[in-house]
Image: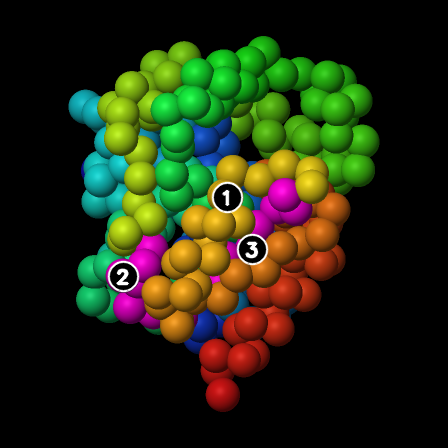
Amino acid sequence: MELPRHELSTTGERRALLVHGLNGTGQTWWRVAESLVAAGWHVTTVDLRGHGAAEPGDDLKLSSYAADLPRDNWDLVVGHSLGGATSVLASLEPRFTRALALFDPVLAITRESRDEIIADQLAELELTEQSLATSKPHWHSMDVALKVDGVKLSSERTARGSFDDNPGWNVVAQAIALPVPTLILSGDPAVYTMLEPSTAAAIVEANPLVTYEVVPGTGHSPFRDDFDATMAALYKWLTSIAG
């Protein structure tokens, strides 16, 4: 599937692809994208199948989400949540990207947590700007507005089907096999994260290309909960792998 693309700069020599999470759109990356553009990057975001302006597709398998991502030999791919799992699968291919950053990626879903996660995603479809701003008073107002826009463009088929079509959701083995420098920026386990610290530790132990950091005080959306700390960690890591 050819995904809708949003280009934020045409001048940067380094090219980054940003891949959103479930019930999101490419527009939800606005703040991260603007920061990267200001740092000299050409930034592309996409709407995943069943999200935003994209067609729904025949299925919502992780492998299909990954197959849709544009193969442009990226310098950096950033994936959040579902977009993190999707980006892991695509990054196993040669020349997909030179570096990968994962913001609280959903690498595995246990049988015990599955029903609760599905219920949470379906509940997102009822979000309003008022309800979200009340529950996330620390979020930027644009993050609130664009998150709500995203869920309005999603559907129960997308929110539920992304789990129904992936009954064995687990890409941990693929994360261990990643062939490119990879940064995992997790939400704080004391707040909320969808990545078990023990899972992250196992990946780091098995793959020396992977770096794992927790963004203190943040939840599943570190870049919305503490934008400055998240971007500082990303830029520090990018500097470390450049040299």
Q: Amino acid at mark 1?
A: Glu
Of the numbered discs 1 and 3, the one sitting upstream in the chain is 3
Closest to the observer, 233 or 56:
233
Residue of label 2: 177
Which image quadrant: the N terminus?
A: top left
- Tell me if mark 1 has few (under 14), some (14-19) or many (20+) residues whose alpha carbon lies within 10 angstroms of its own: some
Relative to 57, residue 10 above or below: below
Of the numbered discs 2 and 1, the one sitting upstream in the chain is 2
Closest to the observer, 143 or 226:
226
Contact? badges 2 and 1 (CB < 8 Å): no
- Residue at image coords 50%, 43%: 196
Distance from disc 3 to disc 2, alpha carbons, whole Å, reads 18 Å
Residue 59: quadrant of the picture: top left
Tally of numbered tags: 3
Distance from disc 1 to disc 3, alpha carbons, whole Å, reads 12 Å
Element assignment for label 1: loop
Residue of label 3: 185
Of the numbered discs 3 and 2, the one sitting upstream in the chain is 2
Element assignment for label 3: strand
- Tell me if mark 3 has few (under 14), some (14-19) or many (20+) residues whose alpha carbon lies within 10 angstroms of its own: many
Residue of label 1: 196
Q: Amino acid at mark 3?
A: Leu
The picture places residue 107, in percent across and down from the top left corner, at: 39, 43
**Residue stretch in magenta:** 175-189
Closest to the observer, 203 or 90:
203
Relative to 112, residue 221 above or below: below
Contact? badges 3 and 2 (CB < 8 Å): no
Numbered disc in front, either 3 or 2: 2
The picture places residue 136, in percent across and down from the top left corner, at: 75, 30
- Residue at image coords 35%, 65%: 206
Residue 16: quadrant of the picture: bottom left
The picture places residue 20, in percent across and down from the top left corner, at: 46, 41
